[in-house]
Amino acid sequence: MRKIILTYSALFTLTAANAQKINVKDGSEKFSNGSHNAYTATIYETSKDDAMSKFKSLLKDFENEKVKTDNGEIFGDNIVIKDWGNNPVDVYASFEEDKSAKTVIIHVAFDLGGSYLTGSDGDKHSYAKKNG
């Protein structure tokens, strides 16, 4: 999870000159496999391609079975987030670009193995929101 948070930070650093506060919210978002609880943030002064490339690279740094991009969505299969233990999770990320504002909205969902990370997941949820 730290690497995911570091990636968020790296992506948000692209806007250091603007010194904007980053808010992470959670709620239901649509992905290729349905609607799931997800964490959403806006990345300033970047393009969708750059944001996707950096996020995909980050996921590949984790122990994983595969990381792939399909139809503008990134899927990380069996990602091991050591801060959450040794159980792998599937990570889904979708991106929305506003070219005129030079912003990208990223939605990230964590499949914990049958359920998606939500507010009822205590420490994992708090950590994701606090460090997003």
Image: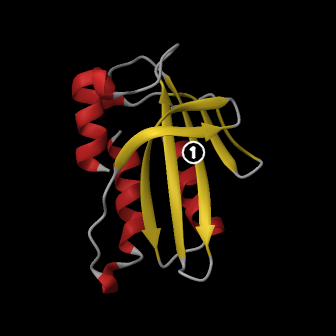
Q: At x 34% / y 61%, what residue is drawn?
A: 9
Q: At x 31% / y 63%, what residue is drawn?
A: 22
Q: At x 71% / y 36%, what residue is drawn?
A: 32
Residue type (three-letter) at the residue carrying disc 1: Ala
Name the foreground residue: 113 vs 35.
Answer: 35
Secondary element under disc 1, as helix, strand or loop, is strand
Quarter of the rendering containing residue 42: bottom left
Name the foreground residue: 102 vs 80.
Answer: 102
Label 1: few (<14), some (14–19) or many (≥20) C-alpha neighbours in 10 Å: many
Question: Which residue, as the protein is rendered here, is positioned at the far right?
Answer: 71
Q: Where is residue 101 in the image (x, y as percent from the top left)?
A: 53, 81
Does 21 sit left or right of 67 as displayed?
left
Give above or below for 46 relative to 10.
Answer: below
Residue tagged 1 = 93
The mark total stands at 1
Q: At x 53% / y 54%, what residue is drawn?
A: 55
Give above or below for 47 relative to 3.
Answer: below
